[in-house]
Amino acid sequence: MPGNIFPTSIAGSLPKPAWLAETGKLWPSWRAEGAALAEAQRDATLLWIKEQEDAGLDIITDGEQSRQHFVHGFLAHVGGIDFDHKQRIGIRDNRYEADCPVVTGPVTLDRRAHPEAAILRAHTARRTKFTLPGPMTLVDTLADRHYGDRRALAMAFAALLNQEARALEGDGIDIIQFDEPAFNVYMKEAAGWGVAALEAARAGLSCTTAVHICYGYGIAANISWKQGLGESWRQYEQVFPALAASGIDQVSLEFANSHVPPELMSLLGGKDVLVGVIDVATDAVETADEVARRIEAAGRYVPAARLCPCTNCGLAPMARPVARAKLRALGEGARLAAG
Ligand SMILES: [Zn+2]
């Protein structure tokens, strides 16, 4: 049943079925092409809309079934970028290396990046959320041979994101979320030009806007990075005051099984807080009780009216039955916490 006291949603992505793309990968190859691929993406989107509704979630996403990767799905539509001669660079402050496209000229967006948002909007009566990569995370996932300045490139991307976000709002999407895992890596820059670029990306929108800041998908490189972060993860402390002063309406953060001191959530006064109560780095499925206890723990720092239970991050690399079970745990746990 929708209409939870604590409105539930996921961070964004869900696993792609094996008939759509390679499984267990963050950047999978598609199983089809052309019209057959578009049809398969639509099928997978409808399937996940239904699963989210059946789990009792209040806000529905398309599970990112029509994009290959949360950053490159947007970038694939951007001009001024060479995708054929990728360059191996260290990203997220050299946490891992990746073959990244290269910025070779001014970035442009001459078409819709995500027309598939219309499928989501047409097939659920519930509120919808659509995700876009944030400007700083885009900058951090590319090699740049044109701008020579990360802030300038971020602001150029912010203009393109704003263009797409306005179109998404026109589609009837209720919440537009920018994914900024890079905010947890470059905290000082994030509080400065990172938030400024985010503001530029959401300029003029009247729908709800959100930012998702996490410690990454549950992949090996991220798990080992987290192990080196110590007992108290205070990255959010540097960025939250700037976000609290910004026009962003909602902040999505990692909480379940993390070492984030919960009191840092109180730095987000006035914002809706999307509290990660589902761990995406383990296949162990939470019980509804565990989820409810996490919601109650967050409730000591976030007013009930602003507490929105969520997942720590996307569920893309997980097995489908695990992701399905975690959606249900989220819905059931939120209802339990609401009493
Ligand atoms: Zn995330």
Image (tube, rainbow, N blue to C red):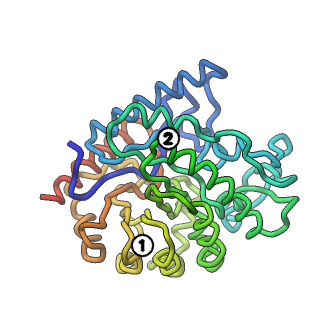
Q: Residue at x 22, y 68 (%)?
A: 296
Helix, strand or loop at label 2? It is helix
Q: Nearer the viewer, residue 9 or 129?
A: 129
Disc 1 within 8 angstroms of ligand 1 (CB): no
Mark in front: 2 vs 1: 2
Helix, strand or loop at label 1? It is loop
Q: Quadrant of residue 54?
A: top left
Image: 175 above or below 299: above
Query: Badge 2, how many Cα within 10 Å: few under 14, some, many 20+?
Result: some
Across and down, in percent, residue 336 comes to 16, 55
| Residue behind mark 1 | 259
Image: 67 above or below 38: below
| Residue behind mark 2 | 171
For the N terminus, the quadrant is: top left
Q: Amino acid under label 1?
A: His
Q: Residue at x 73, y 52 (%)?
A: 98
Across and down, in percent, residue 69 comes to 61, 44
Residue 150 marker: none
Q: Earlier in the sequence, mark 2 or mark 1?
A: 2
Query: Badge 1, how many Cα within 10 Å: few under 14, some, many 20+?
Result: some
Q: Nearer the viewer, residue 263 or 119?
A: 119
Q: Nearer the viewer, residue 123 or 46?
A: 123
Across and down, in percent, residue 292 comes to 22, 60
Across and down, in percent, residue 308 comes to 32, 60
Q: Residue at x 42, y 58 (%)?
A: 312
Q: Is residue 230 at all visible to an observer of this figure?
A: no
Q: Quadrant of residue 159?
A: bottom right
Q: Residue at x 25, y 66 (%)?
A: 305
Q: Nearer the viewer, residue 130 or 316?
A: 130
Image: 175 above or below 34: below
Q: Is residue 198 left or right of residue 323?
A: right
Image: 54 above or below 98: above
